[in-house]
Image: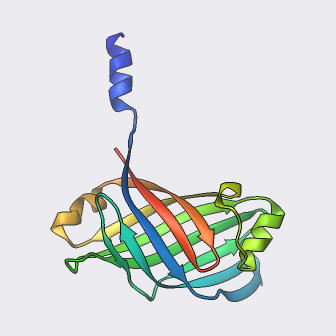
Amino acid sequence: MSGIDELKESLAPRLEHVATVVVDVGAPQEVGDTPQGRRRVIPITGGTVDGPRLRGKVLPGGADFQIIRSATYTDIHARYVIETPDGERVYVENTGIRTGSAEDIARLARGEAVDPARIYFRSYPRFETASPALGWMNESLFIGTGARYPDRVELRFYRIC
C-alpha cells in the first residue's frame, strides 16, 4: 500500500454506536396542508436511552415537527431533552427524512404499523450539553437510523469518528 493509500484509509470515517433511543410519542396534532406541505406535530412523552456512551431517559415535553412533502417523503425535525442517571441533560435536535412507498407512508401517517425494513429513515442529530463529562457530544458529528411504530420511534445514533 502506498503512503497516499495509507493516508486515505486512516482518514476514512468510522461509525461508533453511541446509543439506542426509544422515544414514546403521543397522538399527532394535525395542522393541515400548508404551502410547505402537510404539517403535523407529534408530542414526545418520554422514552429511554441505552448505549455504550450514553444512558438515561427522554424527558417529556419535546416534539417532532413534521412536514409530509409528498405521498412518499416526510421531513422530520424533533427536539427534546435526554437526562442521564447522574442528572446531566443533553438537548437533542434531530433532523432527517423518512421515505417509502405511498401506501406505507400513508399507513404511518394513520398510526398503523409498517415493517421498518420498508422505510428509509435517516437523520443527523445534533447534541448540546453543559456537562463536562459529555462535552465530546458538543464537538462531534452524528448520524442516525430510525424506525417508526404506532406508539414510539426507535433511533440508533452513531458518532462519526
Q: Position of residue 22 (x, y in %)?
A: 47, 72
Colouring rule applied to residues = rainbow
Q: Is residue 104 left or right of residue 159?
A: right
Q: Position of residue 54 (x, y in %)?
A: 30, 64
Classify 27 as above or below 125.
below
Q: Residue at x 30, y 57 (%)?
A: 52
- The answer to which image quadrant residue 128 occupies is bottom left
Question: 66 and 159: which one is in front?
Answer: 159
Q: Residue at x 83, y 66 (%)?
A: 103
Q: Residue at x 82, y 63 (%)?
A: 102
Question: 49 and 61: which one is in front?
Answer: 49
Residue pushed farthest top?
A: 2
Q: Is residue 64 left or right of residue 82?
A: right
- The answer to which image quadrant residue 140 occupies is bottom left
- Image quadrant where one finds the N terminus: top left
Q: Position of residue 25 (x, y in %)?
A: 55, 82
Residue pushed farthest left?
A: 132
Q: Is residue 145 left or right of residue 82?
A: right
Q: Is residue 134 visible?
A: yes
Q: Residue at x 71, y 66 (%)?
A: 114
Q: Position of residue 39 (x, y in %)?
A: 69, 80
- Image quadrant where one finds the C terminus: top left
Q: Is residue 70 visible?
A: no
